[in-house]
Amino acid sequence: MAIKKFVVGSFDDEAVLFPAVRSVRRSGYKMHDIYTPFPIHGLDKAMGLKDTSLDTAGFIYGITGTATALGFISWVFTYDWPLNIGGKPHFSLPAWIPITFELTVLFSAVGMFLTFCYLCQMAPFVKKDHFNLRSTDDLFVMALECTDRTNEAEAVACLERVGAKDVKIDRRETRWWLGRYDKDTKMFGMKETEPVA
Amino acid sequence: MALLRYESQVRGSLIEGAKDYHQVTEDICRPVEARPSRLWWIGFSVSFLMLCFGILSVTMEVIYGVGQWNLNKTVGWGWDITNFVWWIGIGHAGTLISAILLLFRQGWRTGVNRAAEAMTIFAVICAGQFPIWHMGRVWMAFFVLPYPNTRGPVWPNFNSALLWDVFAISTYFTVSLLFWYSGLLPDLASIRDRAKLKWRKMFYGVAAFGWTGSTKHWQRFETLALVLAGLSTPLVLSVHTIVSFDFATSVVPGWHTTIFPPYFVAGAIFSGFAMVQTLLVVTRKVLALEEYITLEHIESMNKIIVLTGSIVGIAYLTELFVAWYSANPYESFAFLKNRVDITSPYGWAYYIMMGCNVLSPQIFWVRKMRRNLVVTFFMSILVNIGMWFERFVIIVTSVYREYLPSAWSTYYRPTIWEVGFYLGTVGLFFTCFFLFAKFFPVIAAAEIKHLLKKSGDSYKHNMGELETEPVEAFVERHGHDHGA
């Protein structure tokens, strides 16, 4: 697969990271990703990432569970094998609430977890690059993707100017996961301008 | 930024000592990377031996049938179901801490949530053993599952509280497991990236699912955690509610009570927190994590123990009041004769329950006691004993003398295999916990890092400056700096 070039710099303080994200975006570089050891609230907005729709998916899975439970139990008890249980009505909705609730939660949770893994392309035995191993420890690692129009030296200088440490140019093979998020990381609210110089 | 990370100085710091992000990783990964201590080996061996004895006891029961237990026609649920409800109750604290306290934005949950969630999962595994082996012919356990079959087709009774229980507990187990594991991914990735040994790289590489810490992933991760917390909150309340339905939907005096659901849920949280205390007071010492599981955490949990203990106390007294006020002779017999009367065969059990669950936690109204580790540890054991007796009292004293005096049973006492089965699950629980403490990060490192600059000891002084700053100066400083 194609080899892509990235300019990678790391930050050790999130207070420096936020203004850096802003000025890097202003300069018009294509931000590939920022790898952080813990969730930083507001960073996704600062990077211009869209909200995730995982919660909507969770809702859809949930109502699927509700419908499955209600549909299945009413089919069993009113059509397939109606049982006389203490003379109570065959269609006894209140008694089905517990199972309906449990299946709603079960479907939603399992569905969301699998969707989460699918969207992030995560599974056991998957190995991924994230440029700097310390990004799961204490560094915030920003990777800019170099296009054919990018002046690499200029990009390195830009990252250094905004406070990044040991900035270097990194080559990575675009495997099936790298660059998968192009759609997700598309900026909004800001026009991609020509790189400076 | 300063405003986003503000936390009042009134709250004590949750992370002690001067830490930076790297130090947090070091501290939390140390137990995983170091060789287990002698204490760990001793604890693990003892637990494993207990587990072996439990396996022997269950084998005896499977070979010779439920007759190996001292259950009889009248007392059909004895130790077995007592233990089941006890373990399920213990399994409630983990999800309460991770879900409900997440929604309430309680910072102190981060120090203890990982271990408490793990405890939940192990406790539910232990609880699940009891109904399964109680079936006697355990190879027919699949009969409870609704699947197309050649027996009719006869479906399980979806109107039965016992079937609701199957659904509730299996859902609870699955959701807790997903919640716990998804939270573990970033920390497993930290260990993977630090690993020097080959097997460790491989093991944690597989376990971490290829987590990178990408911002987009974190965004999804947080959404997942929040929605799972929202789902788990009613779930955790529903599980013990449904367990209480096993009793409350029957017509047995002493079980047929409408206050059972809230009373059981409060009791479950009560015993769950007690077990968390038992484990964490020891764990923080053995793994040297006192700076992360601080007295502040211990105190918060003790507050919950005194609250839920008192709720349980009110429930006990309400039961007695209703037994008298209803003027129902069967109800009064069950409560006032079989339980409160100390001269009745099981009167002693009622008073152990009252003493351990209602009276003893009241000591935690005193701040000094809440922050005393020895008292906390001792109390947590007492509460667990008390909650075991609560279930024993509810189950055995209600059925051993029911409506028909001719069916009254003689004194029920367990056989060695019943006790062995119980000890076996205790062994299973601690074996799992010791393995967890060795191979997984006991504290959610990523969440601690997230809290560090807000609740960390060395960052608290910033809050002090912020608090004493006049409003005008604050506005002047931040007024034109939106976002960033």
Image (cartoon, rainbow, N blue to C red):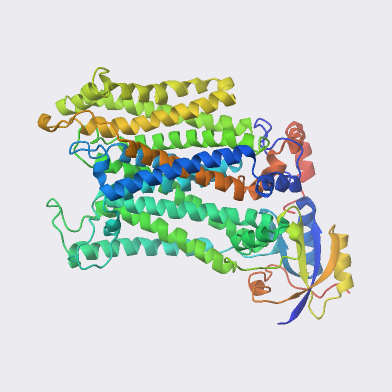
Specify whether A181 is left or right of B249: right
Quarter in which the N terminus of chain A is drawn: bottom right
In the image, residue B233 lies at what x, y percent?
45, 47
Splitting the image into 4 quarters, where does residue B9 fall?
top right
Say how many tags the image has. 0
Camera-side residue: A188 or A175? A175
Quarter in which the C terminus of chain A is drawn: bottom right
Question: Residue at image x 63%, y 70%?
Answer: A184
Question: Residue at image x 44%, y 37%?
Answer: B269
Question: Residue at image x 32%, y 40%?
Answer: B80
In the image, residue A51 lies at what x, y percent?
59, 63
In the image, residue B257 lies at what x, y percent?
25, 35
Return the residue found at the far top.
B343
Splitting the image into 4 quarters, where does residue A165 fall?
bottom right
Specify whether A39 is left or right of B20: left
In the image, residue A24 lies at what x, y percent?
80, 64
Any part of residue B213 in sight: no
Specify whether A140 is left or right of B174: right
